[in-house]
Image (spheres, grey):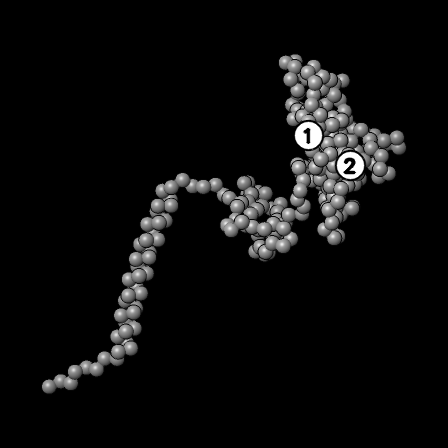
Amino acid sequence: MQKPEQRDPEAAISRRTLVHGLAICAGATVAGAGAALAQQAGPVAPPSTITNPPRDFSPRGAPTTYFWDPDIIAVDPSFNDLAQPNTAIKRLHTGLLWAEGPAWSAQGRYLLWSDIPNNRQMRYSEDDGHVSVFRTPSNNSNGNSFDFQGRQLSCEHLTRRVVRYEHDGTATVLADNFGGKKLNSPNDVVAHPDGSYWFTDPPYGGQLYEGEPDVAGGPSARTKSGGPENRTCCRCCCQTADGTL
């Protein structure tokens, strides 16, 4: 007669628990595979920059990951080399009607931009984060930039011209017509190393919200059909009295 084998109750429970756990994992794996197949079968959504829950971009917002801001998405991967990985998006200012034309002054260490409908330019100072009105009125300026001598360049919708602000505060008109006709509404401008300035001249500044409406048959640059000429880019060269560009 053999003595019945005594089993350890805890070992039995452990084996039952293990088998039960394996069954649950197998079921979850099958369900997960089915969900993955279902997702692949559906339409593929484009990359999104909307975080969930909605993110606070103000200085009070929570910091992001050190390596890359999740809301910075480059449509072309080559642009990833232009972004600073460990810098997060931060809202600098609110309350503007139409913010446009940001430009960074390396000499002054400030960011300049236009608030077109409010007819003013704003400045963000890097040293203390203070935002103030930089120039008003601004002739409904749109695009801004700085040339290689640190002088500010602005495209004005109201006066339909491109101007350069000298270091003494005076303004030099770089261009206000093309072919003897007034410009439409200069939009963006950039300095070229050869001393010239390149700017765009689209027609949409001829409205009350961004500048001044154009009258029928007015002096703006026109095509043969009578409509405003949408020039992609124009080039102008200017010299001051002392011969410097």
Left or right of residue 98, residue 68 in this image: left
Q: How many marks overall?
A: 2
Residue 190 shows in the view: no
The x and y percentages for residue 215 are 70, 18
Instruction: Give the mark nearest the N terminus, 1 or 2.
Output: 2
Left or right of residue 244, residue 52 in this image: left
Rendered position, 177 above or below 38: above
Left or right of residue 154, residue 59 in this image: left
Separation of residues labelled 1 and 2 (CA atoms): 15 Å
Closer to us: 13 or 136: 136
Q: Residues within 10 Å of mark 2 (few under 14, many from 20)?
A: few
Rendered position, 219 above or below 24: above
Residue at the image position 32 percent from the left and 61 percent from the top: 25
Q: Residues within 10 Å of mark 1 (few under 14, many from 20)?
A: many
Closer to us: 56 or 21: 56
Report the disc number at residue 202: none
Please state, as top left, top right, bottom left or bottom right, where the C terminus lies in the image: top right
The x and y percentages for residue 19 are 27, 67
Amino acid of disc 1: Glu
Please state, as top left, top right, bottom left or bottom right, where the N terminus lies in the image: bottom left
Q: Which residue is mark 1?
A: 210
The x and y percentages for residue 157 are 72, 28
Q: Which residue is mark 2?
A: 136
Residue 59 shows in the view: yes
Residue at the image position 66 percent from the left and 24 percent from the top: 203
The x and y percentages for residue 138 are 76, 34
